[in-house]
Every structure is written in C-alpha cells, then in structure tokens.
Image (tube, rainbow, N blue to C red):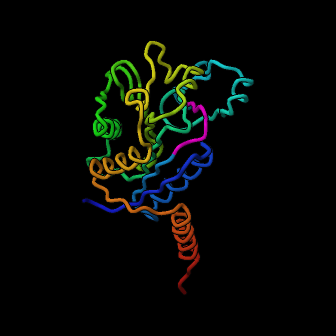
Amino acid sequence: MGRKGYCIELEACSYDEILHLQETLNQARQLGAIPDTLLLLEHQPCFTIGRKKGSSNHLLVNQKVLDEQHIKVFESNRGGDITYHGPGQLICYPIIGLTGVQRDVHAYANKMEELLIRTLAYFGIAAMRKKEYPGVWVEDQKIGAIGIAIRKWVTMHGVSLNVCPNLTHFSFIVPCGITSLGVTSMSRILETVDPRAVRNQLRKQFEELFEIQTELVSVERIKEMVHYAKTSMVSCSGTRSG
C-alpha cells in the first residue's frame, strides 16, 4: 500500500498546543525529517476563526457565556470562517507532502471531503458535498467541516467529523458563516455510535485514499526524531574542511 507514514492518536487537547505541534511537524516534513504523519484527536471546547475569511462577527455570545461554558477562542492560520471544536468531534490533521500531480489544492480539499464521505458511508450515513459550501453534508445539515493550509506543499489542519459532540455549542456561532443551513452529528442520526470505531475507520479510509500505510507512534517519538534532525543539521552546518 504505497508509502509508509505515522499516525499519532491523542485525546482532548488544547487547540493552541496542537497548532504548535502541527507547525513543528510541518517544518520537519518539509525538511524530510519525518514521513507523512496523520494526527487523530479531539479538541477541548473552542471556537477557531480562519485569519483570511473568518469573522468575529459570527461569534454570537459574549465572554461571560464563553467563560461559563469553558470555551476558548483562537485565531487560526487555516482557511475558512469560524467553527467549533470539542469533545465528541473527531479531528483529522494530515501532515503530508504533496508531490507531482498531487500538487493541486482543490484536488486535495476534495480528497479530504471524500475521506469523510467514505467514513460515514461505512456506518450507513449517506453524506454529500454542496457545491456552494465546503465540507460534508447530510441533506441540509453539516456533519463535517474542512479547513486546510499548505506550506511549501506540505499540508496541515484538515477536517472535523461530528461524531457525538455537544451540538448546542454550534448555536453560539454562525458555523462557517452559513446562516441558512444547520448542523448534525452521527449520534443524532444513528442514536448510538462508537467513537473508537469511527476513529479506526477514518484511519483505514485515509490509508486507502492516500495510499499511505501508517504506523502508530507517540508524540514523544516524533519529537525525538525532529530533535535529532535539527541537531544533525546544526552539526553538519558547523563542519568545516581545511
């Protein structure tokens, strides 16, 4: 199955912590210090706003409500408008190098949406794209969001899938700036869903779609590889012949 890569699985993490990790891994992937790497996790409750198209006007509650609900707000360097992340929502952040014919931003975004569609289909949910709106939909209800960034043809950020999140939190914003459509989740459609089974299936679909066979590794191992690569580069740059 194509090339080999890594998969890092985490639980509920703060958004800023994972953003920093993504930036570190993105730079390491650019340098070839690590192979293609998939991050699977959940976020602690937060709203994220894309820096290019995002608007704080789409945040509908004040700081008092945010504090009461323990929701933080972050600016993000991904594409897209405002969205919600929280427990019960599966996050997929690929850090992969796009080469050759794969160097197509629209094709990559389409592939990430396809990843969600295939995962949902496995559980009997017929999801689709909407031409006017990014993401994945079940009729007029959004079930998966997309917001990607690409640096020197290495990806970061990715997609989120509403497995069993607190949907009430979406009412605190205008999700992705769309006022006319709603939000749903797998648990609302199926009543019961196993988050671990969804995570495993999404990873499997990712491997097949991107032709990457992933090995489960820890964050610590990845950081050791990055540190070793940086140390080696410093050592080589300091070597002089005479």
Asked if one can make out residue 73 in the rendered structure from this viewpoint, the answer is yes
Q: Is residue 232 left or right of 60 when viewed as pictured?
A: left
Instruction: Judge whether 204 appears above or below 69 on screen.
Output: below
Residue 164 in percent (x, y) is at 48, 34
> Which quadrant of the figure has residue 54?
top right
Q: Is residue 46 magenta?
A: yes
Asked if one can make out residue 110 in the rendered structure from this viewpoint, the answer is no
Instruction: Judge whether 183 appears above or below 31 on screen.
Output: above
Residue 88 in percent (x, y) is at 51, 38
Q: Decide whether the magenta segment is chiefly helix, strand or loop.
A: strand
Residue 24 in percent (x, y) is at 55, 55
Q: Residue furthest bottom?
A: 242
> Which quadrant of the figure has residue 59?
top right
Query: Magenta segment range?
Result: 42-49
Taking the spot 73% from the left edge, 30% from the top edge, the residue there is 67
Taking the spot 68% from the left edge, 29% from the top edge, the residue there is 69
Q: Is residue 16 left or right of 226 when viewed as pictured?
A: right
Query: 89 or 224, which is in the foreground?
Result: 89
Q: Residue furthest right?
A: 64
Q: Is residue 229 magenta?
A: no
Taking the spot 31% from the left edge, 56% from the top edge, the residue there is 212
Instruction: Judge whether 27 appears above or below 84 on screen.
Output: below
State the quadrant of the C terminus.
bottom right
Residue 71 in percent (x, y) is at 66, 32
How many numbered circles does the render carry?
0
State the quadrant of the N terminus.
bottom left
Taking the spot 57% from the left edge, 48% from the top edge, the residue there is 18
Q: Residue furthest top?
A: 180
